[in-house]
Image (spheres, helix red, strand yellow):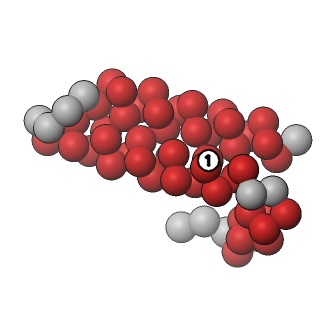
Amino acid sequence: MLPSKWSNLERQRPRLRWAKWGTLAGLALTVLGVVGVGSWGFGVLVMAASIIWGAVQLK
């Protein structure tokens, strides 16, 4: 799923953990929204924001 390099990066930059958990939460919300529980749009928004947050933290 995530490369092993990601674990080292998480130790060096703890904020990346938020990006990983946000992406997983966004994915779960999206899947639940597609099934009919909640809003899939909000899930996509959370997932995209977490990915952008992670990309910014890597720079």
Question: Residue at the bottom extreme?
Answer: 4
* Residue ID at (53%, 32%): 48
- On the image, the x and y values in percent for residue 25 come to 41, 48
Q: According to the image, label 1 marks what residue?
A: 19
Amino acid bearing label 1:
Ala
- On the image, the x and y values in percent for residue 59 come to 88, 41
Q: Is residue 27 above or below residue 38?
A: below
17 sits to left or right of 9:
left
- On the image, the x and y values in percent for residue 51 come to 61, 40
* Residue ID at (64%, 56%): 17
SS at circle 1: helix
- On the image, the x and y values in percent for residue 32 come to 21, 43
The local crowd at label 1, few if under 14, some if 14 to 19, many if 20 or more residues have their Cα within 10 Å, is many
Q: Is residue 20 above or below residue 3?
A: above
Q: Is residue 55 above or below residue 3?
A: above
* Residue ID at (41%, 31%): 44
49 sits to left or right of 56:
left
* Residue ID at (61%, 47%): 19
